[in-house]
Image (cartoon, helix red, strand yellow):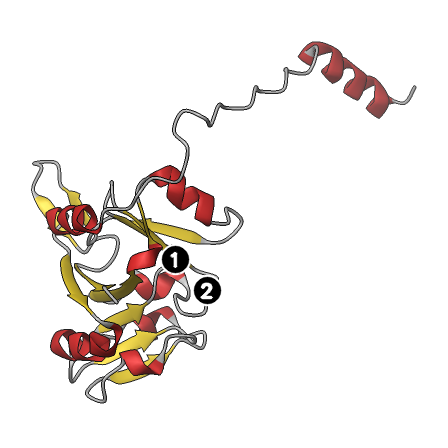
Amino acid sequence: MSGREEVLARLRAARGAPPPVPAEAPREYRPAGGAADLDLLVDRLTDYRATVHRCAEPEVADVVDAVLGGRRVVVPRGLPERWLPVSVTAVTDDDLTTAEVAAADGVVTAAAVAVAETGTIVLDGGAPDQGRRVITLLPDVHICVLRSEQVVAGVPDAVARLDPRRPLTWISGPSATSDIELNRVEGVHGPRNLHVVLLTS
């Protein structure tokens, strides 16, 4: 036996038997499939200090114009052009630098799913209409367009729709934290202003 093999053998002996495989966590405590409550989602988002706009899809550009008209916005490659008014200067994220993203006034994206119970919106960084995570973190304003059929009742319902291997970002309202004196500070870890455009038809 070589010196290397002897050392490895001693290490294995010192470690003892391998730990048992963890038992699979039970998942039947709350099955997916509950009815989604759009009013509850709006209530939660508003409570988190997000601004909610309920409108039909042809009106999305009007909302974007009211929030970011005349300003420069970053958009993911697959965002529908009809959502953007002529009043904004749209810059497509073709691997923009962080400085270029941070220089934008806002960002417009779609979403993967939203949870009514928690007021949480999930972005899929691999989806062409949602784009990289960085583009939703650096600009001061994030406009997120959400279809009513993307709203689910609870977290298990959202997890059932998502691929855990994808780059997912879960957000609940604008970025906010508090300092040591519990004063609320916004915009530290993401946009200070979140506008959710909820498509009702």
Q: Badge 1 local density, few (<14 within 10 Å), some, or many (20+)?
A: many
Residue extending furthest toward the bottom:
86
Residue extending furthest toward the right:
1
Location of the N terminus (image quadrant) = top right
Residue identifier under label 1: 112
Q: In this view, does 109 lie to the left or right of 15?
A: left
Q: Which percent across, then down, holds residue 101?
A: 32, 72
Q: Which percent across, then down, holds residue 150?
A: 34, 56
Q: Establish if 158 lies above or below 82.
A: above
Q: In this view, does 20 lie to the left or right of 152?
A: right
Q: In this view, does 123 lie to the left or right of 145?
A: right
For residue 76, what is the image quadrant?
A: bottom left
Residue identifier under label 2: 127
Q: Does residue 162 appear in the picture of this structure?
A: yes
Q: Which percent across, then down, holds residue 6?
A: 83, 18
Q: Which residue is pictured at 48% across the width and 23% down the height?
A: 26
Q: Is residue 64 left or right of residue 29?
A: left
For residue 109, what is the image quadrant?
A: bottom left
Location of the C terminus (image quadrant) = bottom left
Checking the image for residue 171, the label placed there is none
- Front-lying residue, 92 or 110: 110
- Front-lying residue, 90 or 105: 90
Mark 2 or 1 closer to N-term?
A: 1
Q: Element under label 1?
A: loop
Give the residue type at disc 1.
Ala
- Front-lying residue, 79 or 12: 79
Q: Element under label 2?
A: loop
Q: Which percent across, then down, holds residue 59?
A: 20, 77
Q: Do the residues labelled 2 and 1 touch (CB within 8 Å)?
A: yes
Give the Cα distance between marks 2 and 1.
8 Å
- Front-lying residue, 11 or 67: 67
Q: Badge 2 local density, few (<14 within 10 Å), some, or many (20+)?
A: some
